[in-house]
Amino acid sequence: MAYNKVVIAGINTSELEVLRENEKIALLKEIRETGSRAARDKLIKGNLRLVLSVIQHFTSRCDDIDDLFQIGVIGLMKAIDNFDLSKEVRFSTYCVPMISGELRRYLRDNSHVKVSRSMRDLAYKAIQAKDRLTAALQREPDIQEIAAEIGAKRADVVIALESISDPVSLYEPVFSDNDDTLYVMDQISDSCDVDSRMTEISIRDAINGLNERERNILYSRFINGKTQVEVASEIGISQAQVSRLEKSAIQKIKDSV
């Protein structure tokens, strides 16, 4: 595969430096206070591995990984310029959506699918508003916030953004924690009544054997149709932990049936 190349855009990836979070913050402070070019260059080089990890999700849509890498670095530099040190947010957490957004814009602009000018203009306004709000809020804004920012209807913004979006596989990984991978399908709400599924595979008794937290997670996910992000927010743990507990509970049910 292309992303296994040792040299990308003239850079030997095996020699890339990795900075700790406190080092990144120290460099950001130096950049803000002194405008140090050396500090900026060091911060960019210290986050190139992060760029590499993000572009791997886009290699199937572009044959030239060098181009993707360079566009990803542009996203990294925008993140450096817009990161708010007063917010309690990890720099890498802020960087990922900025890099991904820059890559999506590049791929969208080079797409062969034709979209009407008015639809594309609205989509670009929404994307620019998203960047402004991300910088101001230090998180990704939701569609309603973007629509309010540009004075458009929520439905129109959704349609415009969808019209210029590339299709994504439900099995595309979006997060990995050791051997536990989170896929797109894990973040999709399911409003269907799951009682019929439970009846079909005779797992009601097995569910009763789970602990309270496991039962609550399965109930929220498959009865109420909530995403793992929503469940994590409700019970005060990370999305990765919800994913692990959910998979563990399902495995217990399978083993008991």
Image: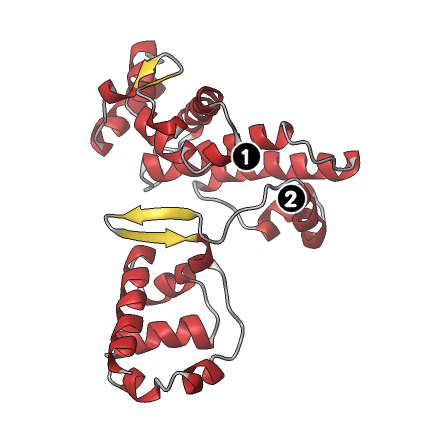
Residue 150, above or below 8: below
Q: Where is residue 252 in the image (x, y as percent from the top left)?
A: 25, 75
Tell me the quadrant of the picture where the C terminus can be found. bottom left
Helix, strand or loop status at disc 2 = helix
Name the kind of residue labelled 2 in the image: Leu
From this view, report whether residue 251 is shown above or below residue 85: below
Please give left or right for residue 191 compared with residue 25 in the image: right
Q: Give the numbered dot on residue 104.
A: 1
Visual colour scheme: secondary structure
- Let me know if residue 92 appears in the view: yes
The answer to whether residue 95 is visible is no
Quadrant in the picture for residue 241:
bottom left
| Residue 1 x %, y % | 39, 30
Residue at image point 69% right, 49% down: 159
Q: Could you tell whether 174 is left or right of 38 in the image?
A: right
The correct choice, above or below, for 63 with respect to 198 in the image is above
| Residue type (three-letter) at the residue carrying disc 1 | Arg
**Pick the front one: 208 or 88:** 208
Residue that carries the numbered disc 2 in the rendered image: 161
- Rounded to the nearest whole Å, what is the CA distance between mark 1 and mark 2? 11 Å
Secondary-structure class at tag 1: helix
Residue found 44% across the figure and 44% down from its top: 139
Picture coordinates of residue 186, whole percent (x, y): 42, 59
Query: Where's residue 38, x and y in %?
Result: 30, 10
Camera-side residue: 256 or 235? 256
How packed mark 2 is, by other alpha carbons closer than 10 Å (few <14, some 14-19, many 20 or more), is some
Q: In which quarter of the image is residue 122?
A: top right
Q: Are marks 1 and 2 in contact (CB under 8 Å)?
A: no
Q: Which residue is drawn at 39% across and 25% down?
A: 80
Picture residue at 32% right of the left edge, 67% below the top: 246
Decide which of tag 1 and tag 2 comes sooner along the chain: 1
